[in-house]
């Protein structure tokens, strides 16, 4: 009985978030006149962007490695800190990409699309996550 409820919520979360993000990205591309990017692409604007992206990815890998040991040592008590660190790393990646796109991209709206896409995706994920998985949220925030 419980699994069926969770199963439907997972299906609703996946379908809802994926379709919402797709529709928002489609709308943003039409409004801003930006070309469609490849899914999970690592297109770099120039060599300096590629260098900074590589530095940030290596640093993030090291941080994730250290965080995994901290999670093993301290358990769920540290989950809020892991969430914050993950958000900071993701924000840095988006800001670096947007900064290079603003200064060096062919289309002047590329950086706006990057920022709005990340913001809309985050809002959609949080909205669906909080509305469908309240118990998980209470564990993460130790409520």
Image: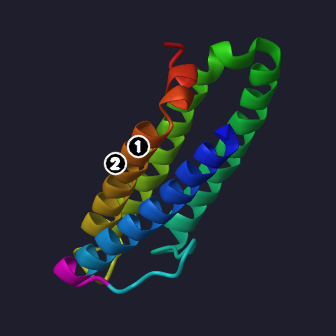
- Observer able to see residue 103: no
Q: Which residue is mark 1?
A: 126
Q: Looking at the image, which is closer to me, 30 or 16?
A: 16
Residue positioned 63% across, 51% down in the render? 7
Check if residue 106 falls in the magenta segment. Answer: no
Q: Residues within 10 Å of mark 2 (few under 14, many from 20)?
A: some
Check if residue 32 falls in the magenta segment. Answer: yes
Disc marking residue 123: 2
Q: Looking at the image, which is closer to me, 8 or 25?
A: 8
Q: In which image quadrant can residue 74 be found?
A: top right
Q: Does 138 appear above or below 62? A: above
Q: In which image quadrant can residue 60 be found?
A: top right
Residue positioned 41% across, 70% down in the render? 19
Residue positioned 54% across, 72% down in the render? 47
Q: Does 55 appear above or below 27? A: above
Residue 16 image position (x, y, % from top left): 43, 61
- Observer able to see residue 5: yes
In the rendered structure, are the residues bearing label 1 and label 2 in contact, judged by CB atoms less than 8 Å apart?
yes
Look at the numbered disc 2 and give the secondary structure of its residue. helix
Residue 45 image position (x, y, % from top left): 45, 75
Which residues, given as a range, are shown in magenta? Answer: 30-34
Residue 51 image position (x, y, % from top left): 59, 61
């Amino acid at each position: 009985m419980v699994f069926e409820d969770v199963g439907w919520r997972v299906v609703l979360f996946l379908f809802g978030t994926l379709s919402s993000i797709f529709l928002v990205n489609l709308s943003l591309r039409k409004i801003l006149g930006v070309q469609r990017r490849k899914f999970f692409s690592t297109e770099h604007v120039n060599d300096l962007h590629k260098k900074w992206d590589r530095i940030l990815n290596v640093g993030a890998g090291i941080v994730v490695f250290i965080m995994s040991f901290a999670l093993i040592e301290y358990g769920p008590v540290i989950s809020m800190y892991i969430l914050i660190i993950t958000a900071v790393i993701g924000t840095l990646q988006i800001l670096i990409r947007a900064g290079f796109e603003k200064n060096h991209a062919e289309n002047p709206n590329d950086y706006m699309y990057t920022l709005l896409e990340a913001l809309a995706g985050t809002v959609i994920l949080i909205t669906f996550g909080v509305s469908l998985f309240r118990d998980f949220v209470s564990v993460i925030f130790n409520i």
